[in-house]
Structure formats: structure tokens, C-alpha cells
Image (cartoon, grey):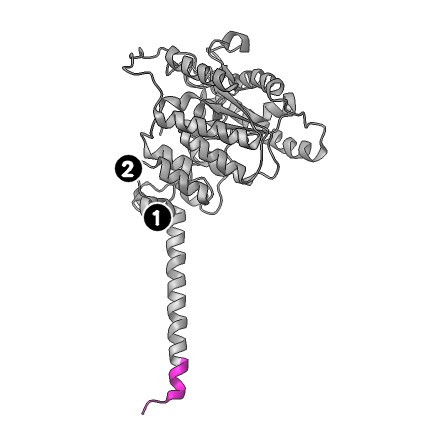
């Protein structure tokens, strides 16, 4: 006859063992996922740009949205040093206009900027062409209803929502690609940007570009136009001044037909629009020195020149306050300046020694 008094403890012990095994299995899966998810701390660091925003402890009067035309060309540290403007770049590689909209929504969960600077370069792109770019944007966002809507709106057909919820399902085959940085940054990644700005102090002068092909249709995709309007209306509801921006990059070409559409939209809705291509001389850019990739993007010297020009424009256009006299903010930004200056000096030293930046060199 079974001792009923022993059955209870036996059943309890079974549940304890099951719970321990289940917890251990979850811990192993979590550790595997953390190991296999790309760390973006080597040659490609852009995958960390979106997530670094959530480390901020002070508000920003200016939020900048867009692709590489903002995060490689505008320096928030210079905006602070020269004008006392507090700013952050919520930029990411090949960021679509719909993604800019959802990043603005996400920003408004945390703060209310006085102005938004939006890059219009992505107006020509109706959908994403490379999953890696989607991952660099979407994986860095905090989970919320905004992120869920962003994923539903911008995922490629071959992408799966469940693989964003459980990245291990997407990256389980990365074992063969694991490198030193995957272990070094297992617990915590280093900081790679300066309020969203991606610094490069190397120089590669202007080169020859391929001849641009004529397009059959220069109209912007409807989804880009739809989300530009949504950005405008959201800014209007929140009392935020929206400014449209085109960087002074020389390639890919910015067609006159696109320029006309953006200018017409800005005129129709009373928006400020600054296209920096015809202002290259006024800005003082020298494409033999101020670009690190032959004219596509600015290096730190070009970005600082462009930022000084934009800062003067934005301060007047958006009536942004000078916060340099505020002790608490000044202390926070002094730390940012030290980090910025140290990285710039380190990169300049590498360029002098090697002629290039080793951390960004091709393998």
C-alpha cells in the first residue's frame, strides 16, 4: 500500500525539478540568443545607433530623423558647443520615411522636442531592399505598441514578426560567424555614437561616380508621401516645428524632379526646407578633404562645417534656446564633448600612423 503521506512531498519535489529544468533551459536559450545576435562593435557599428538613444538622461529640443544623410553628416556636439542646442539623431542605415514616422512616435513616448529635422533623401524609397537595414533600425527600438506597428508596416515579405520577438530564430546559424567581439560584448556593448552621430576622421577625396540613369517615373512612392504627411500632422498636433533637409552629398543624384516635389510640399504646408547641395560653397565644404568615402558622406571635418551652417539656420528658424548657461545640462554635455574629442583625437592618430582607420578597414 502506498504511503499517502509521502505522495505529497514526492509530487512537490517533481514540480521543483521541473521548474528548475525549465528555468535552466530558458537561461541557456537566453544566453545563446545574446551570444548570437550581432553586436555591431566592429567594422559595422550602425546597428547600435537606434538603441543608444534610450541611454539618454536629458531632453532634446531638436530630434533629427533619417538615414546616413543625417547620422554621418550632422554633429550634435557641435550644435551644443556653437549654439547651445540640445539634439539627438535618431538615424539608421537606409531608414525609410515610414520608419522615421514610427521613430518619431517612439521619441514622443519619452520627450517632446521643439523641432524635428527630417531627411528627405529616403522619399525615393518605397520599401526596404535589404533585411540587414531593417534589422539595424528595428531591433534597436524598445518594445512597445509603436515598435509593433513599425514592424507590421515595414517588414519585408520574407521577414517574420516572430523572429523579431525571438531573434534566436533568425540568428541561430551564426555560430560559424562568431568572432571576438561577440564574446567581448556579451554583457554590454560600448558606446559608438555621439548622440546618434557616426564619426569618421579619415579622408578619401571626391572620386568619379557612375552616370545616373534616367528614371521612367520620378514620382515619390505613395507610401513615402503618406508617411511624410503623417509626420507633418503629428508634428502639428504636438506643436513641433518640422524642417525638411537634404544633405550636400553628390551621389546618388538628387534629381530636379524630386527637388520640385519636396519644395512644392514645403510651400504648400508652410514648412522650412533646406537643400544643402546648392549651398556647398556657402557652407565651405571641400570635397577633397571633407569626405571619407569619395563624396557620399561627410567626415568629421565636413560634418562640423555643415553643422555650423545648419545650427545657425535652425536656431533662427525654430527659435531654439541656448542652454549653455544651464549648469545641469552643461555638465552632461561636457561629458559628451570629452567623449567626442577623445574619439576624434584617437581616429586622427590612427590616420597619421596607418593612413586609414583600422577599425573600419575591410577584412
Residue 2 figure quarter = bottom left
In the rendered image, residue 100 lying in the magenta stretch gets the answer no
Q: Is residue 331 above or below residue 12?
A: above
- Where are the magenta residues, as a range? 1-9
Residue 151 screen position, x and y as percent: 38, 39
Q: Residues within 10 Å of mark 1 (few under 14, many from 20)?
A: many
Residue bearing the label numbered 1: 168
Q: Which mark is residue 312?
A: none
The residues tagged by marks 2 and 1 sit, at their Cα atoms, a distance apart of 19 Å
Quadrant location of the C terminus in the rendered image: top left
Q: Could you say whether the residue bearing mark 2 is in a helix, strand or loop?
A: loop
Q: Which mark is residue 157?
A: 2
The extreme bottom residue here reads 1
Q: Decide if residue 269 is on the left or right side of residue 317.
A: left
Q: Decide if residue 190 is on the left or right side of residue 95.
A: right
Q: Decide if residue 2 is on the left or right side of residue 67.
A: left
Residue 144 screen position, x and y as percent: 46, 45
Query: Dominant secondary structure of the magenta stretch?
Result: helix
Check if mark 2's residue and mark 1's residue have beta carbons within 8 Å.
no
Residue 25 screen position, x and y as percent: 37, 60
Residue 337 figure quarter = top right
The answer, for residue 299, to whether it is visible in the render is: no
Query: Which is more toward the observer, 294 or 79?
Result: 79
The answer, for residue 30, to whether it is visible in the render is: yes
Q: Residues within 10 Å of mark 2 (few under 14, many from 20)?
A: few
Q: Could you say whether the residue bearing mark 1 is in a helix, strand or loop?
A: helix
Residue found at x 61% / y 17%: 312
Amino acid at each position: 500500500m502506498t504511503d499517502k503521506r509521502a505522495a505529497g512531498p514526492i509530487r512537490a519535489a517533481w514540480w521543483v525539478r521541473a521548474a528548475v529544468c525549465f528555468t535552466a533551459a530558458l537561461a541557456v536559450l537566453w544566453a545563446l540568443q545574446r551570444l548570437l545576435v550581432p553586436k555591431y562593435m566592429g567594422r559595422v557599428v550602425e546597428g547600435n545607433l537606434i538603441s543608444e538613444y534610450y541611454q539618454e538622461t536629458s531632453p532634446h529640443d531638436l530630434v533629427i530623423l533619417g538615414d546616413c544623410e543625417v547620422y554621418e553628416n550632422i554633429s550634435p556636439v557641435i550644435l551644443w558647443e556653437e549654439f547651445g542646442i540640445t539634439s539627438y539623431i535618431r538615424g539608421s542605415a537606409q531608414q525609410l520615411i515610414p520608419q522615421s514616422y514610427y521613430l518619431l512616435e517612439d521619441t514622443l513616448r519619452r520627450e517632446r522636442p521643439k523641432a524635428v529635422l527630417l531627411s528627405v533623401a529616403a522619399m525615393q524609397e518605397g520599401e526596404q531592399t535589404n533585411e540587414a537595414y531593417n534589422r539595424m533600425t528595428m531591433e534597436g527600438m524598445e518594445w512597445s505598441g509603436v515598435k509593433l506597428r513599425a514592424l507590421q508596416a515595414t517588414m519585408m515579405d520574407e521577414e517574420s514578426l516572430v523572429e523579431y520577438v525571438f531573434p534566436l530564430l533568425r540568428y541561430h546559424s551564426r555560430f560559424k560567424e562568431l568572432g571576438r567581439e561577440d564574446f567581448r560584448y556579451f554583457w554590454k556593448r560600448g558606446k559608438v555614437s555621439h548622440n546618434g552621430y557616426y564619426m569618421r576622421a579619415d579622408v578619401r577625396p571626391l572620386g568619379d561616380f557612375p552616370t545616373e540613369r534616367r528614371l521612367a517615373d520620378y514620382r515619390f512612392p505613395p507610401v513615402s508621401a503618406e508617411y511624410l504627411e503623417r509626420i507633418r500632422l503629428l508634428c502639428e498636433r504636438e506643436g513641433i516645428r518640422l524642417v525638411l533637409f537634404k544633405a550636400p552629398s553628390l551621389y546618388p543624384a538628387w534629381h530636379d524632379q524630386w527637388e520640385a516635389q519636396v519644395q512644392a510640399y514645403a510651400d504648400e504646408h508652410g514648412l522650412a526646407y533646406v537643400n544643402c547641395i546648392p549651398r556647398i560653397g556657402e557652407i565651405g565644404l571641400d570635397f577633397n578633404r571633407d569626405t571619407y568615402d569619395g563624396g557620399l558622406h561627410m567626415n568629421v571635418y565636413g560634418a562640423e562645417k555643415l553643422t555650423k551652417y545648419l545650427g545657425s539656420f535652425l536656431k533662427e528658424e525654430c527659435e531654439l534656446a541656448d542652454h549653455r548657461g544651464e549648469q545641469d545640462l552643461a555638465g552632461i554635455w561636457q561629458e559628451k564633448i570629452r567623449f567626442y574629442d577623445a574619439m576624434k583625437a584617437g581616429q586622427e592618430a590612427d590616420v597619421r600612423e596607418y593612413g586609414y582607420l583600422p577599425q573600419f578597414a575591410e577584412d
